[in-house]
Amino acid sequence: MEQRVPLDAGEILFVRSADGAIGVVKSGCARQIFIETVDDEIVMAVSAEDLLVASGFSNDSTTTKAIVCTLSLIRDAGSPLIVLPKDHPASSRLRVVASVGKRTVLRCDIEKGTHPEQDVLCGPAGLSGLEIVAAKGSVVLRGGDSLTVERKPFR
């Protein structure tokens, strides 16, 4: 299944399954995003149409608020993305993880917060395999069954 959903810089797109949710926002302007690993700092240039995607592992109001907060911290406050080493004890405690770029694929078979590659993101099983692709003035969603899609103001 492929679905094109309109999305501008002042909106957030929520995609929900029974076991989790993602939030998607446009970068809104050309900028640099910093990705911090234990050994390195990676600087990633993004365009206004590139996407920030945050994945939450529950479908409750607390997770929804955490998704909005995470995206705001990265996009609006310039906070870096943090990448943990594999088997780091904090990985199991992460409630929201994020990626940035033109395309993100959600996978449920990877460890949360450990992938510096920004085209893959840990997600709940109900969203595994979902591909989120940036498009001019919209987002393209590929894959996923029984998903709820909702646009809301982001501010």
Image: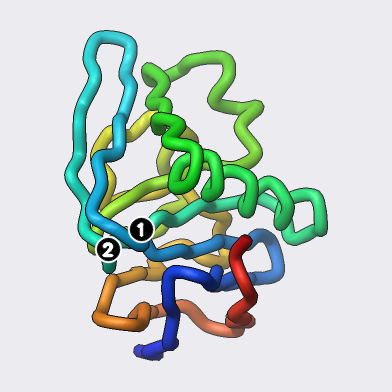
Above or below residue 142? Residue 119 is: above
Asked if labels 1 and 2 touch by Cβ distance under 8 angstroms, the answer is: yes
Return the x and y of residue 30 as percentages of the image width and height: 23, 54
Q: Residue at x 36, y 82 (%)?
A: 138
**Which numbered circle lies on residue 100?**
none
> Where does the C terminus fall, quadrant-wise?
bottom right
Q: Is residue 89 left or right of residue 7?
A: right
**Which numbered circle lies on residue 48?**
2
Return the x and y of residue 81 as percentages of the image width and height: 40, 32
Question: What's the distance in space between the residues labelled 2 and 1, CA to CA?
Answer: 5 Å
Q: Amino acid at mark 1?
A: Ser
* Outermost residue, top side: 39
Quadrant housing residue 78: top left
Whether residue 105 appears in this view of the structure is no
Whether residue 106 appears in this view of the structure is yes
**Which numbered circle lies on residue 27?**
1
Element type where label 2 sits in the image: loop
Quadrant housing residue 38: top left
Above or below residue 91? Residue 117 is: below
Q: Residue at x 20, y 27 (%)?
A: 42
Q: Residue at x 45, y 31 (%)?
A: 79
